[in-house]
């Protein structure tokens, strides 16, 4: 018990430390903009500050409701007494830890080792690889092929990733279970998870499709072994499919019900734009490999996928790993095919490709174990082979590596933590300039989605800065409905800023303001430069704001 407690504690400390190191890198590069200023990333901070300011908790949403993400973000800020920006950094660390725990849950039922240290390490390896990938990412481009760092952001589907891994783990346990009672419990848990996940983000259905398909193949192999007895095949198929069918049915019901709450997300499925999607993916990938850090990340990812492929073709792996582990490894090996799938349905947003990264990172844990066991089984005689698979044995080299990681990573994180704390307490200089200017006046301003949101959540009064589109209509997209109550004109406009990787939202309500507007009869505004941002001030409310119109309902 003491050894297990020490192993679990060490694993948790290393996971937290890796999370701190990942955030430390992010806040020291231009990609910190994605964490603290990006229009999507700061949604939860805007929600928190809006409620703190006394406005009703009544927002227009996108197809994603971010239910789990919001609960986690608010809990993190409340538990540690953090500001809205500090909570974004702390939440990033928590995201990394939860990714590791979800990855461990997914592979735990098919890990052959009984060593408490190696089982605890099954959470560390995927997070270590994720952190190494994050250390190569530094672009401010929200449309880049830098997928690892998206796991640190609050609204780039981190909870959807955990849901996929947890669902995978539950369905894998279901496929391997022989007890009817255990299968019933697993189905109930899977229905609960998929219901919450679909309610928050229907994207989980697309992301879990590959693992689910592989598990169905695993079940089919069981039926094939029973092919001589048709009755047994039928009984096995009915028993095996009862659980997945129940889970799919629950997901379908929730998907239909949530259409009345927010956009259903169907507008993102545009097969007629497949050429645009493939062009976007190809361009983003080419830009990524054109840089040395990007090339190194792609090589690392390719090595992980290659390990999964090799584990599938090496003789003896399927025998030593077992069918469940083979199913997980196959999922990692086939993950690159998701690029084709999302391209065909015409979704040009690279963030939807995250399973291409995280599924191999999880599967490689089992691929490494399977390859090591297959190698031992091939080299030793039957008596030595029995000793090779005896639980609890570890080589001195592995022990030394484990100690180095358990000591070195937390020490490095301790050195990096002051930088993280300092960065999470200060805004981007350009944004802070606008915040200071706006705080010195009580007049209402406006700006587009891409420009105002990093400023908005730092203002004492959220209603002082309105989110509008290019025609200065109130935007019904990720903003509080009550921001616009009684407000029909603004006296200043903030615009500009670097917006690389900008792709239009799936509805026309989110468009950018690219130049200082001309207001008939108001004269020229006074211009204040804040680095990449510009404030155009007319001194009085002369810029008309069109009232919001309900869309997508």
Image: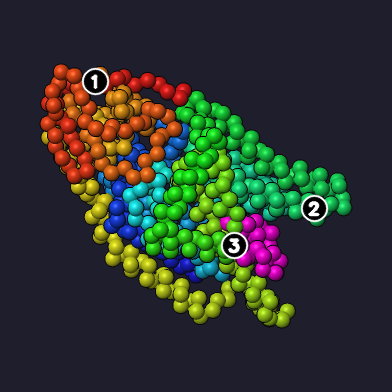
- Rendering quarter of residue 342: top right
SS label for mark 3:
helix
* Mark 3 nearby-residue class (10 Å; few <14, some 14–19, many ≥20): many
Q: Which mark is residue 224?
A: 2
**For this rendering, which residue is in front, 181 or 108?**
108
Return the residue at label 1: 544
* Mark 2 nearby-residue class (10 Å; few <14, some 14–19, many ≥20): few
- Rendering quarter of residue 526: top left
Mark 3–mark 1 Cα distance, whole angstroms, equals 58 Å
Q: Which residues are magenta?
A: 309-332
SS label for mark 1:
strand
Mark 3 or mark 1: name the one nearer the start of the chain.
3
* Mark 1 nearby-residue class (10 Å; few <14, some 14–19, many ≥20): some
SS label for mark 2:
helix
Residue plotted at (47% across, 47% down):
281
Mark 2 or mark 1: name the one nearer the start of the chain.
2
Q: Residue 191's x, y, as percent?
A: 59, 40
Q: Is residue 504 above or below residue 426?
A: above
| In the displayed structure image, the side of residue 219 where residue 444 appears, left or right | left
Mark 2–mark 3 Cα distance, whole angstroms, equals 25 Å
| In the displayed structure image, the side of residue 317 where residue 4 appears, left or right | left
Q: Nearer the viewer, mark 3 or mark 1?
A: 1
């Amino acid at each position: 018990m003491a050894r297990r407690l020490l192993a679990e504690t060490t694993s948790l400390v290393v996971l937290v430390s890796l999370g701190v190191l990942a955030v430390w890198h992010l806040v020291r590069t231009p990609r910190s903009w994605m964490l603290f200023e990006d229009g999507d990333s700061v949604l939860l901070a805007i929600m928190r500050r809006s409620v703190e300011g006394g406005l009703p908790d009544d927002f227009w949403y996108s197809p994603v409701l971010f239910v789990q993400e919001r609960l986690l973000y608010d809990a993190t800020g409340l538990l540690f007494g953090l500001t809205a920006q500090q909570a974004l950094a702390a939440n990033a660390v928590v995201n990394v830890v939860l990714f590791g725990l979800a990855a461990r849950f997914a592979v735990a039922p098919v890990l052959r080792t009984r060593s408490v240290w190696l089982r605890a390490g099954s959470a560390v390896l995927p997070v270590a690889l994720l952190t190494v990938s994050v250390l190569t990412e530094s672009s401010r481009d929200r449309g880049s092929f830098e997928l690892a760092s998206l796991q640190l952001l609050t609204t780039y589907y981190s909870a959807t990733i955990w849901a996929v891994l947890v669902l995978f783990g539950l369905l894998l346990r279901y496929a391997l279970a022989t007890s009817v009672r255990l299968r019933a419990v697993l189905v109930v848990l899977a229905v609960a998870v998929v219901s919450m996940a679909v309610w928050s983000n229907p994207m989980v259905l697309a992301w879990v499709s590959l693992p689910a398909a592989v598990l169905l193949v695993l079940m089919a192999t069981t039926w094939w072994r029973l092919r001589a007895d048709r009755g047994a095949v039928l009984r096995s198929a009915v028993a095996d499919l009862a659980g997945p069918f129940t889970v799919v049915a629950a997901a379908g019901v929730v998907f239909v019900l949530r259409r009345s709450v927010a956009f259903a997300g169907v507008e993102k499925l545009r097969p007629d734009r497949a050429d645009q999607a493939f062009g976007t993916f190809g361009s983003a990938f080419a830009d990524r490999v054109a840089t040395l850090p990007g090339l190194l990340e792609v090589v690392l990812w390719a090595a992980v996928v290659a390990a999964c492929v090799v584990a599938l073709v090496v003789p003896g792996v399927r025998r030593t790993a077992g069918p469940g582990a083979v199913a997980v490894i196959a999922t990692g090996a086939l993950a690159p095919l998701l690029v084709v799938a999302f391209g065909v349905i015409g979704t040009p947003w690279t963030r939807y490709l995250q399973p291409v990264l995280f599924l191999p990172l999880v599967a490689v844990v089992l691929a490494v174990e399977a390859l090591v066991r297959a190698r031992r089984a091939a080299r030793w005689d039957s008596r030595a082979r029995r000793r090779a698979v005896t639980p609890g044995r570890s080589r001195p080299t592995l022990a030394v590596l484990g100690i180095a990681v358990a000591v070195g990573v937390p020490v490095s994180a301790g050195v990096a933590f002051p930088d993280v704390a300092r960065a999470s307490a200060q805004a981007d200089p350009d944004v802070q300039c606008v915040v200071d200017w706006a705080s010195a006046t009580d007049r209402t301003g406006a700006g587009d989605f891409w420009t105002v949101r990093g400023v908005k959540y730092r203002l004492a009064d959220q209603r002082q800065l309105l989110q509008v589109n290019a025609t200065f209509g109130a935007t019904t997209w990720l903003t509080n409905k009550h921001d616009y109550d009684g407000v029909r004109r603004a006296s200043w406009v903030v615009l500009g800023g670097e917006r690389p990787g900008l792709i239009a939202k799936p509805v026309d309500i989110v468009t950018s303001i690219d130049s200082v507007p001309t207001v008939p009869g108001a004269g020229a505004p006074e211009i204040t430069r804040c680095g990449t941002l510009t404030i155009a001030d007319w001194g009085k409310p002369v810029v008309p704001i069109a009232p919001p119109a309900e869309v997508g309902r």
